[in-house]
Amino acid sequence: MNEFAPRHGRNQPSSMFFWPTADRPVAVRGEGIFIWDDEGRRYVDASCGPQTTNIGHNNRRVVEAMRAQMDDICFAFRSHFKNGPAETLADRLADLGQDKGLTRAFFCSGGSEAVEGAIKLARQYALAKGEGTRYKIISRLPSYHGSTLGALSLTGDPAMFAPFAPMMQIQPKIPAPFVVERPEGESEDAAALRFAQALEDEIINQGPSTVLAFIMEPIGGAATGGLIAPDVYYARVREICDRHGLLLIYDEVMCGSGRSGKYLCAEHWDANPDIIAMAKGLAAGYVPLGAVLARGDMVEAVYDAGGYAHGHTYSAGPLACAAGLAVMDVLMEDGLVANAARQGAKLKAALEGLMDEFPFIGEVRGRGLMLGFDVMADRKKRIPLPPELNAGSEIAQACYDRGLIIYSRRMLDGLRGDHFLVTPPLNVTDEEIGMIVDLLRQGLGDFAPKAAAATR
């Protein structure tokens, strides 16, 4: 029994505050894709928390690497000292980003901080080039880029940013590329190019000399449930950014660090971003760690103009970076990135198979082990289930009750319906894929009568 469980178990009051959620048990142990609670019950972590524990729980190589670093030094402030783990991790990321021209790294503690760091670098680069009129950053609706005020101004979710709107400058939005909702007779590629054209239209609407960058999740996360566009979209977006002098920022906080079947999600396309925001899987939940990976010439220009005016107390901490290095070693040496591509294809095919059993599944999306699906009253017409049905929370809870954890979210107050991410650790096996699909089938089956009643 965990020493903290008697006081802080289920149905016990908590001194913490958090967003409203169902009462939960105490997690006491993790191993691979599994978590055990204080009552001995096992859960399949098919969401990796919020797409974080990419190498699974309790990997001993990472734990031992962290312990070894603790024996040396846990904290050294970047303004006072360099440290070996941070310098080595930056070199490793630069090597991985070399083909994209992304050769400089800044470290922080998480995804929101990484997005903040990315947009601050973009702005300082514009100033270094004498383009001080550029300050607007276009993002997509819906989208999710973080919860700090700067990142929230980019997040395409009016319900999230509305309470804080007077405190920040909301940035322009264009529609996310849901090509499945295209008019009859329009091809997927034509729809993708139409969505890309919305970017150019908005740049012109805002005034090209005022627009600094476009930020997008190459594979959608919390807001769009694995949304991925046809390849032509990525190339056209890059062309439009080049034509109007914009920087292109990829938010790979959820979809990066091997989850898509490539270490950098950007590797799937020839259209290179100028900056990538990373976190979550970078240290796989063993310690908070995020990064901004950027073009070397951009960083040099900012340095020449006076330096990068940004930082955090825990930037480039030796313990966090030692964990990040160990996680990267596990990913690469154990073949987990390739496993994500291989097992992701199997899992996606299995999720698509569930569409035959459950007509309320609208679309299965994603690549590698960054997969999602939404639920609809009418799949063909893309009519959401009634919001009052609470499909997201009902299905997620039904799965949780059976020992399966998936990630649920409602986009734009349900206007596009409820959706789910199914994103297990990258070391998931064939047997575990089968377990996930079987438990998901049972959870969906629990909800099926309610969906049928609502669509009669």
Image: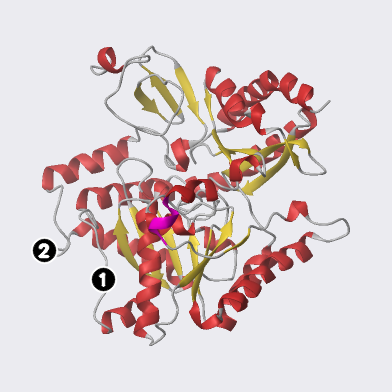
Q: Which residue is painted at 31% across and 79% down in the image? A: 302
Q: Locate the C terminus and report the quarter of the image it occupies.
A: top right
Residue 149 shown left or right of residue 222 in the figure: left
| Badge number at residue 309 | 1
- In the rendered image, residue 20, in percent from the top left (x then y), is placed at 43, 30
Q: Is residue 396 above or below residue 150?
A: above
- Residue 166 lies in the magenta stretch: yes
Q: Position of residue 86 (x, y in %)?
A: 25, 59
Identity of the amino acid at label 1? Ala
| Res 236 seen here | yes
Is residue 331 a member of the stretch shown in magenta? no
Q: Give the magenta part as a residue range.
A: 164-168
- Asked which secondary structure carries label 1, the reply is loop
How busy is the neighbourhood of tag 2: few (under 14 within 10 Å), some, or many (20 plus)?
A: few
Residue placed most toward the observer, 133 or 221 = 133
* Above or below, 220 relative to 234: above
171 or 77: which is nearer to us?
A: 171
Give coordinates of residue 359: x percent, y percent.
79, 31
Q: Residue type at mark 2: give it.
A: His
Disc number placed over residue 80 in the picture, else none = 2
